[in-house]
Image (cartoon, grey):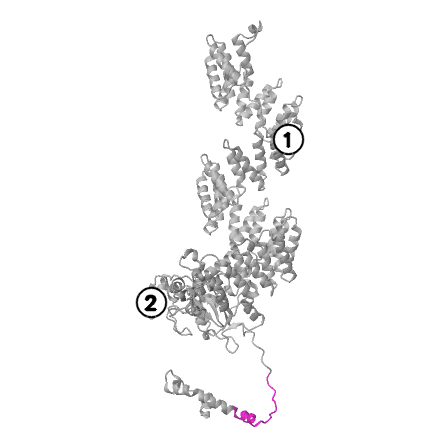
Amino acid sequence: MAAAIWAVGTFGLPGWLLADQHPVRNVLEGLSWPAGIVATLALGAPGLWRWMRGRSANLQPTLAERAPSPLVGRALHLVDGELPPVSAVGLLDLRVKPAIDTHAEDGSDLPPYVARDIDEDLEWAIHAGGIVLLHGPAAVGKSRAAAEALRRLRPNHKLLVPNGGPALREIADAGVDLSETVIWLDDLERYLGAEGLDVGLLQRLCPPGGTGIAMVATMRDEQLALHAHAATRSIADTSTGIDQAAVEVLAGVRGRRRIRVAAALTDTERTRAAQVGERDARVRRAVAAREGFAEYLAAGAAMMDRWSTGESPEFVRGQALISAAVDCRRAGHHDPVPVALLADLHTEFLPSVWRDRADLPSLDVGLHWATRRVLGASSCLQPTSDQHYLASDYLLDRAQQAHADSTAPLTGPVRDRTWSVLTAALTPTQNFRIGASAYFASRYDIAEQAFISGATSDPKALFYLGIVLDQQPGREAEAEQVFRDAIAAGDTRALNNLGILLAGQAGREAEAEEALRDAVASGDSKAPFNLGTWLSKQPGREAEAEAVLRGAFAEGTNKALTNLGILLGGQVGREAEAEGVLRDAVAAGEAKALFNLGTLLSKWPGREAEAEDVFREVVAAGNTGALNNLGVLLAGQVGREAEAEKVLRDAVASGETKALFNLGLLLSKRPGHEAEAEEVLRDAVTSGETKALFNLGLLLSKQPRREAEVEHVFREAVAVGDTRALNNLGVLLAEQSGREAEAEEIFREAVAAGDTRSLSNLGVLLAEQSGREAEAEHVFREAVAAGNTRVLDDLGVLLGGQAGREVEAEEFFREAVAAGNTDALFNLGVLLGGQTGRKSEAEEFFREAVAAGDTNALNYLGLLLAEQSGREAEAEKFFREAAAAGSSRALANLGLLLAQEPGREPEAELAYRDAIDAGHTDALNNLGVLLAGQAGREVEAEEFFREAVAAGNTDALSNLRLLLGEQPGSEAETEDFRAMPHPDVPTL
């Protein structure tokens, strides 16, 4: 027999003898164990004999023990410590999910593969080498499609399945030959991180242009969305974030290398599936299944039923175990969970009425129920080695989508006890992922505990702990200290975050700059961008900022182009450069650059249409913030207010709170929409847009009898730091009798806050107070010195009322006119009209004022002309124009003019009566004078005199006495009735 074994070993057996079920093969297989024993004894007999006789043989030198392979313990499915070929590893070992009615342990009875439309892109990526990511919902065939493609294209390449991210890094650091290797990363999130796969390690393993290594990864859409959310968080744009390594890796996987596997089949895939279904009944049933092709094959709906529906004691225990395992994965722990931890945690998920029941089955019974395969496919709770269990991806997906799935038994946030049990039971390294998940769930208390645990074995956790503390108001000092501790421990990433933290604290700019420059020197790729951005906000350092941002872009930070464009756009004369840079940023894929390009164009006269196109493109790309800017752009174009309103309402509906402010502003300018404008502005304030308080105050100030509300709103605006409201509050108080002192105090606060408008109003307030003219003049002159040309007119009025200062007053009026103040034209006319020999000059300025739209000047021009013989007709014309413009004084003056012309008394009476109806009480006296001169109308005259007296007209009292004959002696015979002209006295 030994000879036969030797012959077979030397020459092999004829192929026909080894055919399946051949009699010779069956015999040989039956003899294989006895033959092996005989051969072993034959080969080892001499040595065995020597041992049995007790002979001492000279020890022979042996080869030194081979060093353990760096793959052992770090890679799965090894063969004799070496990587197996792709073709030698079964589909189930690659975590391809069993389908219904799959029983073979090697997966050989899986349904035939149905070719997917994505196979073309997948094959291209695998052939090209480098990383490719397949993503989609759970149980849609991501792993199956990838594994089948590898078997087609690289069956003989080595296969590396790392036992976690740190293991992958250790294998690479050990110098293992990975040429012609496929790296399989199913559920990519388990491998990502600074301790595992980051951009640096990815580039080492898969350098650009290299085809030797194909890295094939899968990820569920829900998990990918979490990383996308991390990328959009505010800190991710400036600081190095907790999930930054993952964010950066995923950001680099795009185009044909990021492939989405959909749950629903396309029409062509359905046709292929129907053809395959002719050979496999499972595929045929899946094509027609209501729940969908992939879900049917994976028994997804049945697994949900297993988890969700039941009443038996076994169900209650098993459901709680499944829920506990699912919650562990929701908390970020994607490794199999030890049975002891499940035993501790699952009671949290038992219905309260079951927790103390005697008929609740044992833990083993519950585990047996939960791990039972459903319809021959996967189980809800998947057992692994050493009494560890992992919740199904499919159930995890459904739990994370529970807001849309009322059948999921696990809803709401991760349970508090799940967080606490995990952080207490897991290793410091495992707590890194728990900390990151808690952070993104805004459970900073849990994240803090997790990273404190992590820091006991890895100082890198200090950096993450600093990020968590930095996100909590009031803990900046703690965050700073932790960042400094991380830096001292050698983690230079913390320099960048420390710089950002300090930059937000007044008075610490120098420290912030130092930290950011140190971060740049340490090689932190984010630091140049942050340093340049920070410098761009420092007055006078624009040139430095530009240089740093250009350097950041040169080093590969494309978003530096966006900030560079913003910087240039703020510099006069560099708008064209800014546009070019922003367009380059857009071409480089920077979505924010398109928004900023629209903003730049919207400020550029004549380019509104281009800006509108850009904003609409940004909106179409999903940036609802551009709706607000588009609405503002449209609101500034005559006739497009309705469009603007619709766009702003869309922005509000999408959650853009800034749009509430702009919508309220737009509505406040539309007559009849005041109530809605008020409501919208109040909503804006409630949502945090505190600048809306000022505009709300302005809106209310235009409505009668709401002064108390206006004051309250303006004071609220002042309290939140809006100093604009100080001036308006001062004006409001100044109009209320007895509150002048408060108004003065508020105006002085506004002046101290840098509001030069308040100098003007303070001057007006002081000028109205007897004895404070000198103070008013001083304030007006301060306002002029501050560049407020409007007060030139006020200063002229003040000086014009002081004897001997008419020349100075005229000088200021002329300066005001030169500065474009049309009010000064009128006041200059008044000043000159009162000076002998300068009436023609006065007339000229009144006419200029009229041409500028000052209807007040019409009345004064009429008065000036009425005093000049022969110009009565011109005077009448201007009085009538003034009256038509709403001047009751002009009506009274017109009546006086007409009363002096014989035969026009009826016209004069009519003018007086119109003036009285318009509220001009002095016309009562003048009408009384007119009637007293007409026989038989004394009673009417008396009536109007008495009304005038009641209104406070002292001339009417004298006239009434004359009418009644109450004046003593001859004076009554010589005194005439007095009718007075009524010019518009210049006011401040």
**Residue 974 lies in quadrant:** top right
Q: Which mark is residue 519?
A: none
Question: Which comes sooner in the sequence, label 1 or label 2?
Answer: 2
Amino acid at pointer 2: Arg
Q: Residues within 10 Å of mark 1 (few under 14, many from 20)?
A: many
18 left or right of 210 in image: left
Q: Quadrant of the N terminus?
A: bottom left
Does the residue at mark 1 contact the one at mark 2 (Cβ under 8 Å)? no
258 left or right of 469 in image: left
Total marks drawn? 2
Q: Judge whether 728 appears above or below 536 on screen.
A: above
Amino acid at pointer 1: Phe
Of 323 and 800, which appears nearest the observer? 323
Secondary structure beneath dot 1 equals helix
Secondary structure beneath dot 2 equals helix
State the image coordinates of residue 71 (x, y, percent, origin top left): 54, 74
Start-end of magenta stretch: 44-63
Of 853 and 92, which appears nearest the observer? 92
Q: Which mark is residue 284?
A: 2
Of 986 and 548, which appears nearest the observer? 986
Q: Which mark is residue 780?
A: 1
State the image coordinates of residue 246 (x, y, percent, origin top left): 53, 61
Q: Judge whether 613 appears above or below 449 on screen.
A: above
Asked if residue 48 lies in the magenta stretch, the reply is yes
Asked if residue 753 lies in the magenta stretch, the reply is no
Is residue 172 shown to the viewer in this render? yes
